[in-house]
Protein backbone atom coordinates (compact mmCIF):
# COMPACT_ATOMS: atom_id res chain seq x y z
CA UNK A 1 0.00 0.00 0.00
CA UNK A 2 1.39 3.43 -0.91
CA UNK A 3 2.04 6.05 1.75
CA UNK A 4 -0.74 8.22 0.31
CA UNK A 5 -3.30 5.46 0.81
CA UNK A 6 -2.17 4.90 4.40
CA UNK A 7 -2.88 8.53 5.28
CA UNK A 8 -6.30 9.86 6.18
CA UNK A 9 -6.86 13.48 5.10
CA UNK A 10 -9.14 15.55 7.32
CA UNK A 11 -10.07 19.08 6.22
CA UNK A 12 -11.83 21.49 8.60
CA UNK A 13 -13.78 23.66 6.20
CA UNK A 14 -16.52 25.43 8.15
CA UNK A 15 -14.83 28.71 9.11
CA UNK A 16 -16.60 31.93 8.10
CA UNK A 17 -13.68 34.04 6.85
CA UNK A 18 -14.62 37.24 8.67
CA UNK A 19 -11.56 39.08 7.33
CA UNK A 20 -12.58 38.64 3.68
CA UNK A 21 -16.29 39.38 4.01
CA UNK A 22 -16.59 40.78 0.48
CA UNK A 23 -15.68 37.34 -0.84
CA UNK A 24 -17.66 35.23 1.61
CA UNK A 25 -20.61 37.67 1.64
CA UNK A 26 -20.68 36.98 5.40
CA UNK A 27 -22.59 33.78 4.68
CA UNK A 28 -20.54 31.30 2.69
CA UNK A 29 -17.75 29.49 4.58
CA UNK A 30 -14.33 30.71 3.52
CA UNK A 31 -13.44 27.30 2.10
CA UNK A 32 -16.30 27.59 -0.43
CA UNK A 33 -15.81 31.26 -1.32
CA UNK A 34 -15.25 32.01 -5.01
CA UNK A 35 -11.53 32.72 -5.38
CA UNK A 36 -10.46 33.32 -8.98
CA UNK A 37 -13.39 31.31 -10.31
CA UNK A 38 -13.25 28.30 -8.00
CA UNK A 39 -14.07 27.51 -4.36
CA UNK A 40 -10.98 28.04 -2.22
CA UNK A 41 -10.89 24.44 -0.97
CA UNK A 42 -10.87 23.12 -4.55
CA UNK A 43 -7.24 24.20 -5.06
CA UNK A 44 -6.08 22.09 -2.15
CA UNK A 45 -8.30 19.16 -3.15
CA UNK A 46 -6.90 19.19 -6.68
CA UNK A 47 -3.36 19.03 -5.32
CA UNK A 48 -4.23 16.17 -2.96
CA UNK A 49 -6.01 14.12 -5.62
CA UNK A 50 -3.30 14.70 -8.23
CA UNK A 51 -0.76 13.42 -5.74
CA UNK A 52 -2.72 10.25 -4.99
CA UNK A 53 -4.67 11.01 -1.82
CA UNK A 54 -8.23 9.70 -1.99
CA UNK A 55 -9.43 9.12 1.58
CA UNK A 56 -10.54 12.69 2.30
CA UNK A 57 -13.00 13.76 4.99
CA UNK A 58 -14.30 17.34 4.92
CA UNK A 59 -15.94 18.81 8.01
CA UNK A 60 -18.51 21.61 7.76
CA UNK A 61 -20.39 23.45 10.49
CA UNK A 62 -23.85 23.05 8.96
CA UNK A 63 -25.63 20.68 6.60
CA UNK A 64 -26.34 23.40 4.02
CA UNK A 65 -22.58 23.96 3.67
CA UNK A 66 -22.07 20.29 2.82
CA UNK A 67 -24.97 20.50 0.35
CA UNK A 68 -23.40 23.55 -1.30
CA UNK A 69 -20.12 21.65 -1.59
CA UNK A 70 -21.93 18.78 -3.34
CA UNK A 71 -23.61 21.22 -5.73
CA UNK A 72 -20.28 22.85 -6.58
CA UNK A 73 -18.79 19.41 -7.26
CA UNK A 74 -21.77 18.50 -9.46
CA UNK A 75 -21.24 21.68 -11.50
CA UNK A 76 -17.54 20.92 -11.91
CA UNK A 77 -16.12 23.59 -9.60
CA UNK A 78 -14.78 21.01 -7.15
CA UNK A 79 -12.75 17.98 -8.35
CA UNK A 80 -14.83 14.82 -8.20
CA UNK A 81 -14.06 12.24 -5.53
CA UNK A 82 -15.92 10.12 -3.02
CA UNK A 83 -15.43 12.60 -0.18
CA UNK A 84 -16.69 11.83 3.30
CA UNK A 85 -18.51 14.82 4.78
CA UNK A 86 -19.10 15.33 8.47
CA UNK A 87 -20.75 18.08 10.51
CA UNK A 88 -18.73 19.42 13.44
CA UNK A 89 -17.86 23.05 14.26
CA UNK A 90 -14.11 22.67 13.77
CA UNK A 91 -14.01 25.87 11.70
CA UNK A 92 -10.70 26.47 9.97
CA UNK A 93 -8.62 27.93 12.78
CA UNK A 94 -8.73 25.88 15.97
CA UNK A 95 -7.21 22.65 14.77
CA UNK A 96 -7.14 21.36 18.34
CA UNK A 97 -10.92 21.04 18.23
CA UNK A 98 -10.41 17.73 16.50
CA UNK A 99 -8.61 16.46 19.58
CA UNK A 100 -11.89 16.69 21.48
CA UNK A 101 -13.82 14.80 18.82
CA UNK A 102 -16.03 12.27 20.58
CA UNK A 103 -15.01 9.30 18.46
CA UNK A 104 -11.57 9.90 16.99
CA UNK A 105 -11.40 6.36 15.66
CA UNK A 106 -14.07 7.23 13.10
CA UNK A 107 -11.83 9.96 11.73
CA UNK A 108 -8.83 7.68 11.36
CA UNK A 109 -10.99 4.83 10.04
CA UNK A 110 -8.21 2.27 10.28
CA UNK A 111 -5.54 4.49 8.70
CA UNK A 112 -2.10 4.56 10.21
CA UNK A 113 -1.85 8.34 10.25
CA UNK A 114 -3.77 11.55 9.77
CA UNK A 115 -3.06 14.65 7.69
CA UNK A 116 -5.08 17.41 9.36
CA UNK A 117 -5.44 20.68 7.52
CA UNK A 118 -7.99 23.44 7.00
CA UNK A 119 -10.07 24.52 4.05
CA UNK A 120 -8.37 27.89 3.67
CA UNK A 121 -4.82 26.84 2.79
CA UNK A 122 -3.13 26.05 -0.50
CA UNK A 123 0.26 24.51 -1.18
CA UNK A 124 2.39 23.25 -4.03
CA UNK A 125 2.93 19.62 -4.94
CA UNK A 126 6.56 20.02 -3.92
CA UNK A 127 5.39 20.78 -0.38
CA UNK A 128 3.07 17.78 -0.40
CA UNK A 129 5.93 15.62 -1.62
CA UNK A 130 7.96 16.77 1.39
CA UNK A 131 5.03 15.89 3.64
CA UNK A 132 4.90 12.32 2.31
CA UNK A 133 8.63 12.04 2.83
CA UNK A 134 8.24 13.19 6.44
CA UNK A 135 5.45 10.71 7.01
CA UNK A 136 7.51 7.89 5.56
CA UNK A 137 10.47 8.74 7.78
CA UNK A 138 8.56 9.40 11.00
CA UNK A 139 5.30 7.43 10.68
CA UNK A 140 3.37 10.19 12.32
CA UNK A 141 0.37 12.48 12.04
CA UNK A 142 0.96 15.94 10.63
CA UNK A 143 -0.93 19.22 10.92
CA UNK A 144 -0.64 22.40 8.85
CA UNK A 145 -0.49 25.28 11.31
CA UNK A 146 1.51 28.37 12.21
CA UNK A 147 4.28 28.03 14.75
CA UNK A 148 3.67 29.77 18.10
CA UNK A 149 5.61 33.04 18.34
CA UNK A 150 6.51 32.75 21.99
CA UNK A 151 9.17 30.51 23.47
CA UNK A 152 8.01 27.30 25.07
CA UNK A 153 10.49 26.84 27.93
CA UNK A 154 12.42 24.94 28.85
CA UNK A 155 12.42 21.99 26.50
CA UNK A 156 12.66 23.16 22.89
CA UNK A 157 15.74 22.59 20.74
CA UNK A 158 16.51 23.31 17.09
CA UNK A 159 18.16 20.83 14.77
CA UNK A 160 19.78 21.84 11.46
CA UNK A 161 18.04 25.22 11.68
CA UNK A 162 14.84 23.58 10.47
CA UNK A 163 13.61 21.08 13.01
CA UNK A 164 12.51 22.12 16.48
CA UNK A 165 11.99 19.36 18.98
CA UNK A 166 10.69 19.39 22.52
CA UNK A 167 13.39 18.03 24.77
CA UNK A 168 13.57 17.45 28.50
CA UNK A 169 17.02 18.96 28.94
CA UNK A 170 17.70 21.80 26.49
CA UNK A 171 16.19 25.15 25.60
CA UNK A 172 15.99 27.25 22.42
CA UNK A 173 13.96 30.02 20.82
CA UNK A 174 11.46 29.71 17.98
CA UNK A 175 12.23 30.92 14.49
CA UNK A 176 9.31 32.60 12.63
CA UNK A 177 7.35 30.96 9.85
CA UNK A 178 4.70 28.39 9.06
CA UNK A 179 5.16 24.91 10.42
CA UNK A 180 4.14 21.33 10.48
CA UNK A 181 3.45 19.91 13.90
CA UNK A 182 4.05 16.20 14.16
CA UNK A 183 3.45 13.65 16.85
CA UNK A 184 4.50 10.06 16.72
CA UNK A 185 1.21 8.52 17.81
CA UNK A 186 -2.30 8.68 16.43
CA UNK A 187 -4.13 11.92 16.92
CA UNK A 188 -6.79 10.12 18.96
CA UNK A 189 -4.25 9.78 21.76
CA UNK A 190 -4.74 13.51 22.35
CA UNK A 191 -8.48 13.78 21.86
CA UNK A 192 -9.32 14.22 25.56
CA UNK A 193 -6.35 16.39 26.46
CA UNK A 194 -7.94 19.82 26.10
CA UNK A 195 -10.85 21.46 27.85
CA UNK A 196 -11.58 24.22 25.33
CA UNK A 197 -10.58 25.07 21.73
CA UNK A 198 -9.03 28.43 22.62
CA UNK A 199 -5.88 26.71 23.82
CA UNK A 200 -3.31 27.01 21.06
CA UNK A 201 -0.18 25.27 19.85
CA UNK A 202 2.00 26.13 22.83
CA UNK A 203 -0.40 24.47 25.24
CA UNK A 204 -0.77 21.51 22.90
CA UNK A 205 2.97 20.93 22.92
CA UNK A 206 3.38 21.46 26.65
CA UNK A 207 0.54 19.06 27.39
CA UNK A 208 1.97 16.53 24.97
CA UNK A 209 5.27 16.72 26.79
CA UNK A 210 3.60 16.11 30.14
CA UNK A 211 1.97 13.04 28.63
CA UNK A 212 5.40 11.84 27.49
CA UNK A 213 4.78 12.19 23.75
CA UNK A 214 7.45 13.24 21.29
CA UNK A 215 6.49 16.37 19.34
CA UNK A 216 8.38 17.82 16.40
CA UNK A 217 7.99 21.16 14.66
CA UNK A 218 9.38 21.46 11.15
CA UNK A 219 9.62 24.73 9.23
CA UNK A 220 8.27 24.92 5.69
CA UNK A 221 8.88 27.62 3.11
CA UNK A 222 6.33 30.41 2.86
CA UNK A 223 6.55 30.21 -0.94
CA UNK A 224 5.13 26.70 -0.91
CA UNK A 225 2.32 27.18 1.60
CA UNK A 226 -0.26 29.93 1.85
CA UNK A 227 -2.99 30.53 4.42
CA UNK A 228 -5.79 32.66 2.90
CA UNK A 229 -6.75 35.18 5.57
CA UNK A 230 -6.61 38.57 3.83
CA UNK A 231 -7.16 40.10 0.41
CA UNK A 232 -3.38 40.25 -0.03
CA UNK A 233 -3.25 36.47 0.41
CA UNK A 234 -5.73 36.12 -2.45
CA UNK A 235 -3.41 38.15 -4.68
CA UNK A 236 -0.47 36.01 -3.60
CA UNK A 237 -2.32 32.93 -4.90
CA UNK A 238 -1.07 33.87 -8.37
CA UNK A 239 2.26 32.35 -7.36
CA UNK A 240 0.55 28.97 -6.99
Image (spheres, rainbow, N blue to C red):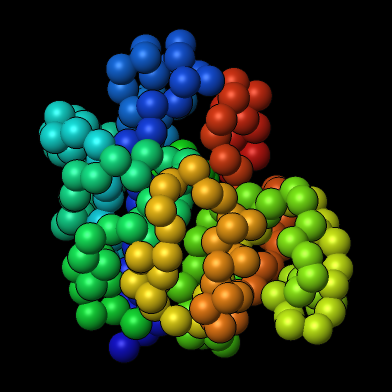
Q: Is residue 100 left or right of residue 226?
A: left
Does the rendering let one see residue 126?
Answer: no
Residue visible at 41% across and 70% down in the picture: 190
Does the rendering let one see residue 183?
Answer: yes
How many marks the image carries: the answer is 0
**Residue nearest the viewer, comparing 157 with 160:** 157
Q: Position of residue 161 (x, y in %)?
A: 85, 70
Q: Position of residue 174 (x, y in %)?
A: 80, 59
Residue visible at 55% across and 67% down in the picture: 207
Q: Position of residue 10 (x, y in %)?
A: 34, 58
Q: Is residue 118 left or right of residue 205?
A: left
Q: Position of residue 124 (x, y in %)?
A: 57, 54
Q: Quadrant of the N terminus?
A: bottom left
**Residue nearest the viewer, comparing 17 with 103:** 103
Quadrant for residue 226, please give it: top right
**Residue nearest the viewer, comparing 47 with 176:** 176
Q: Is residue 160 left or right of residue 216?
A: right
Residue visible at 56% across and 83% down in the picture: 212
> Would you place residue 34 above or below residue 216 in this image?
above
Residue visible at 42% across and 65% down in the picture: 193
> Would you place residue 158 above or below residue 20 in this image?
below
Q: Quadrant of the C terminus?
A: top right
Quadrant for residue 87, please give it: top left
> Would you place residue 50 above or below residue 122 in this image?
below
Q: Is residue 40 left or right of residue 210?
A: left
Amino acid sequence: MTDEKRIKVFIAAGGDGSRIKKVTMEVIPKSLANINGFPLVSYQLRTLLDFGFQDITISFNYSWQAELFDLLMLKGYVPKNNYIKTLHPFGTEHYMDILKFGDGKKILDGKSSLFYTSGDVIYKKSWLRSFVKLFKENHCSIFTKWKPKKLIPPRVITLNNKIVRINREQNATWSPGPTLIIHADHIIDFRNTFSRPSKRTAVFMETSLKNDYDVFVIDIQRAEYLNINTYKDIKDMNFF
